[in-house]
Amino acid sequence: MGKIYASTSDKVTEREIKHAKLAGRMASECIVLLKNNGVLPIAKGGKIALFGSGARHTVKGGTGSGDVNTRNSITVEQGFENADFEVTSKDWLDRNEEILKRSKIDYQKFLDERSKETGIPQEYLSFNEPYIIPDVAEIEDSDLSDVKAVYVISRTSGEGLDRKAAKGDYLLSDSELTGIEKLAKSGSKLIVVLNVGGIVQMKELEDMPGVDAIVLMSQLGNLGGDVLVDMLTGVTTPCGHLSDTWAEDYGDYPSSAEFGLNNGNVHEDYYKDGIYVGYRYFDTFAKTVTYPFGYGLSYTEFSVNIVQIVQISDKIDITFRIKNIGQKYSGKDVVQVYVSAPGKKQSTPYQELKAWVKSDELKPGQEQDISTSFDLASLASYYETSASYMIEAGDHIIRYGEDSRSTKPAAILRIKEDKVTEVCEHICPLDDEFDEIESNRHKEAFDPNDEDGKCYAEIIEVDTGCIETITHKYSSKNEELIDTHPGEIITLDDVRNGKYTLDELISQLSVEEMARMCVGTLRRNDGSITVADAFTVPGAAGDTSSVLKESRKVDTMIMADGPAGLRLQPHFKTDKEGNILPGGAVFGDIIKPWPKDTPSDAIDYYQYCTAIPIGWALAQSWNTEMVEEVGQMIGSEMEQFGVVLWLAPAMNIHRNPLCGRNFEYYSEDPFLAGKMASAMTKGVQKNKGRGTTVKHFAANNQEDNRYFVNVHIKERALREIYLKGFEIAVKESKPASLMTSYNLLNGIHTANSRDLTQKALRDEWGFEGMVMTDWLTSQDVPGLTGKFGAHYPISASTGCIYSGNDIQMPGCEKNIDDIIEAVKSGEEKDGFRITKADLQCCCRNIINLILKLR
């Protein structure tokens, strides 16, 4: 048995208290005030009427691997009671409770029967058939009163299944609309709270008379109820801003015509929206929206003035003066910086986010000068005709505002001639042609002049000579390492001590040893998947192979799911010898019972982790400093519980609001997503021997049929939208590892794409870490592929080695056998021909990371 890191005490620790407070401070920055007719903030204490599914059963986060098994979670009802409110709607809450109880009993019965029928474990079934919150109880006339009412709308979403453009999901249910309308007409002040992990259609509520305030609580982790009530009562002032555009109708999203089951096609998705995702589409095509990207209200008001805009070397530096001009409340402001490109050589969006600032907490009358900057190279667009990034000559207009619809010109960057910033090679060629949407309306929209033609925006003549032109060099085939020390056994300790190099160790490994090293393990012992050292950390997702542990002193790296904290089993038992006993595993609402033969003298262990706000909420904070602080906290919990790699942050783009895992991801904007992932990674990796795993690389924007959906994306959109966030995270924070996605990209599984994992990731961006697959990528697992089946061949083990996808997580004996057979035969297998040198390269990347972290 390996070392057990968990505690034998069930008492709440100082660490839990300290970390919960930090998670709560983070959560307070994530709440977005969407509407306020003067009802907020409310006085603390007194009476309050609570309605909605989230009032008593507040959702702390999403389902699947993004869940966190924390000790407790504060509901909205508890939050109000903790703040000395009297909840007057107990009768309604109790009636709704009965509905929830019956629905959960029915759901568990369904899982029991379905699992017996199919032989598929319940936790796998729950991916394709998750628990859905039932419609709420009706609000009767007897439930109405003259006290303030809070209606909490909740939604669950998660891994393995997309949302639906239907009532009770993206749309409000009939009962929700009827209940809210009844409260709105009752004359009492009404606050609607959105306890959701993704966008819901709000047009009806925005237009409904009597709805006095709308608050996007999101899903905030452990202390959500307390944090919300602090905001509603003015203990804190809301300072969150949206990280997505909220359209009036689902059909307004350009991707809606192609997206998944809602379009009846789960196998192919043509990204006809191209670069026009989110505000890039809505602002460029002047579409009316409910809430624009970057939007958020406060209890106070701010003035924003420009102190200076100046070019400093290859950057543009901007200093703002932000002043709280309100009379009563302190607050923080977010000022966003966008740039509008000339767009004469190719279609460009109206504006793109390039930087932002978030002020300190400013008291009424207090002001702050705060600076931000952006690289001039970030003005470049990708040109498919030349496979290069280029800054177009002409006027690039800097714009600033508190959301994408309130921006105004700040300066003109005048660039005299085209400037190439990067020379690349093409990647991920299309497997099927299609047309993208384009726009030329920016030619009129980008005019910063007033009616008489006089330009009031400052003109800055940009010196582009300081911008380096990078010509990327790409790797050729791998060269085999030859053992120059036959008869000696080189260990990783020898490499650490400088006696031998890592390449010299790798050169001694057999094909069989390396094949096993490139196939990770999972905590299962049913014969299909090898047992892992991660068994010493119950609930961990898996670990690297122990095949070289004894002979070469190569330790393992235990991995745990994220990104809302560590997902571990909170309570487990061992026998006196330290062997971990079955039972106690938690997967959502499913808890594995302790077997009847569990020894009476079994030893109890506990590993309670902190649940932080979901990724979507974190992005709404626009506070990278605090996200980094939270990351450092998570890294300390990793250290405490023996976790080496955190399978987070998740940073795919919110292309469509129905993606089931949008709650994990940050934004529709790759710049914001990249900056958030960088901050989280920097924080985690401040802890020695701990690393992050940015995921899912790339274009993992659909959960239905996620193993076999083939996304068709043109290269410019791929690079500028779907890879850009990963590029920022890799370059700025140097994550220890990266996880590829399940989907195919232009006909090739991303796990088998050398264009992604070698050309873009390593050759262009300089990534030096380890690449892993998503879980069971190279296995045929009907329980996870579900009702959709294998429309394409599964990801090939040989393709992973060929592409530089170093480790298959977790693997099976067939994965190992396929690699060994292909290397030894020299023949093509499953479409790929691999060499011993390719295998050595992957193995080296894995052991090099172990050398750094262990």
Image: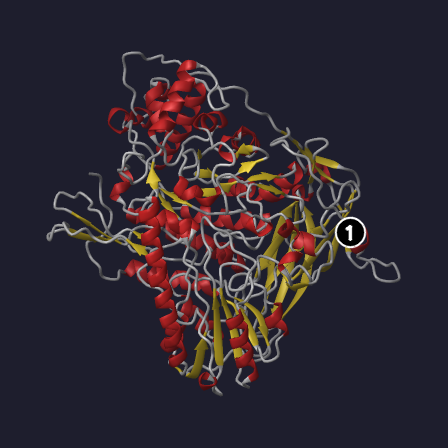
- Give the quarter of the figure containing the N terminus: top left
Q: What amino acid is found at the position of numbered circle 1 in the picture?
A: His
- Give the quarter of the figure containing the C terminus: top left
- Residue 732 versus residue 508: which sits nearer the camera? 508
Query: Left or right: where does residue 664 sit relative to residue 282?
Result: left
Q: Where is residue 532 shown, x and y percent of the image?
A: 28, 37
- Residue 193 versus residue 177: which sits nearer the camera? 177
Residue 563 sits above or below residue 188 on the image: above
Q: Quadrant of residue 156?
A: bottom left
Q: Which element type, helix, strand or loop, lies under badge 1?
A: helix
Q: Residue furthest bottom?
A: 146
Q: Residue furthest front?
A: 117
Question: Coloured how?
Answer: secondary structure
Q: Where is residue 54 shown, x and y percent of the image?
A: 43, 69
How packed mark 1 is, by other alpha carbons closer than 10 Å (few <14, some 14-19, many 20 or more), is many
Q: In this orientation, does residue 234 appear?
A: no
Q: Residue at x 26, y 42 (%)?
A: 535
Q: Which residue is mark 1?
A: 442
Q: Quadrant of residue 721?
A: top right
Residue 480 sits above or below residue 102 on the image: above
Q: Residue at x 30, y 20 (%)?
A: 490
Q: Where is residue 783 shown, x and y percent of the image?
A: 39, 43
- Residue 121 versus residue 283: which sits nearer the camera? 121
Q: Where is residue 586 shown, x and y percent of the image?
A: 31, 53
Q: In this orientation, does residue 471 appear?
A: yes
